[in-house]
């Protein structure tokens, strides 16, 4: 089965925002901000959608929780998405995670 975890990574303590160059001419190229003329994007959070390996929902949740624990994210959503889309919100929402509450399964997920 194909699962995806969507979460938001906040900036590190002491940082005001993320800064990264947006160079549409050379996508995928990473250079220090001081060495590029590309527009600089500023954002307080980074949205992420990551593929999760798991044959069952419990396996996917276990794998997803490992990822969440090693990020600064405090909330996440687990989707079942056989289309393997990297677009946010695509697929069937299976469960949500909140720090301190754990997983909350979606009743009508039908998996």
Image (tube, grey):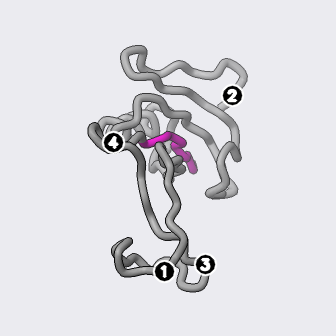
Q: Secondary structure at mark 1?
A: loop
N-terminal label among 2 and 4: 4
Q: Point out the tag, 3 or 1, that comes first from the N-terminus.
A: 3
Dividing the image into 4 quarters, which one contains the C terminus? top right
The mark closer to the camera, 3 or 4, is 3
Does residue 14 appear left or right of residue 41 in this picture? left
Coordinates of residue 89 in the picture (x, y in percent) = 68, 43
Quarter-wise, where is residue 9 in the image?
top left
Residue 37: image tag: 1
Magenta stretch bounds: 1-9
Residue found at x 50% / y 66%: 40
Image vertical order of residue 49 relative to residue 33, above or below: above
Magenta-drawn stretch, dominant element (helix, strand or loop): strand
Q: Comparing marks 2 and 4, which lies closer to the viewer? A: 4
Which sits earlier in the primary sequence, circle 3 or circle 2? Answer: 3
Residue contact between numbered discs 3 and 4, judged by CB atoms under 8 Å: no
Identify the element where label 4 is drawn: loop
Could you tell me residue 69's position as x and y percent? Answer: 31, 35
Q: Does label 3 or label 4 sit earlier along the sequence?
A: 3
Residue at horizontal 38%, vertical 71%? 33
Of badges 1 and 2, the one in the foreground is: 1
In the image, residue 66 lies at what x, y percent? 32, 39
Measured as percent of width and height from the top left, residue 104 is found at: 53, 19
Q: What separation in Å lies between label 3 and label 4 (alpha carbons)?
A: 28 Å
Say which quarter of the image contains residue 64. top left
Question: On the image, numbered disc 2 is attached to which residue?
Answer: 109
Q: Which residue is mark 4?
A: 71
Q: Secondary structure at mark 2?
A: loop
Q: Are marks 1 and 4 in contact (CB under 8 Å)?
A: no
The residue drawn where x is 39% and y is 22% is 99
Mark linked to residue 24? 3
Name the residue rendered at 32%, 44% in the picture.
15
């Amino acid at each position: 089965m194909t699962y995806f975890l969507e979460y938001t990574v906040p900036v590190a303590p002491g940082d005001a925002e993320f800064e990264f160059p947006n160079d549409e001419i050379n996508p995928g190229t990473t250079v220090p901000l001081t060495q590029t003329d590309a527009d600089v994007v500023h954002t307080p959070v980074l949205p992420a959608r990551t593929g999760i390996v798991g044959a069952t929902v419990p396996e996917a949740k276990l794998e997803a929780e490992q990822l969440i624990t090693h990020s600064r994210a405090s909330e996440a959503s687990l989707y079942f998405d056989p289309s393997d889309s990297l677009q946010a919100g695509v697929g069937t929402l299976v469960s949500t995670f909140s720090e301190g509450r754990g997983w909350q399964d979606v009743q009508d997920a039908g998996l």
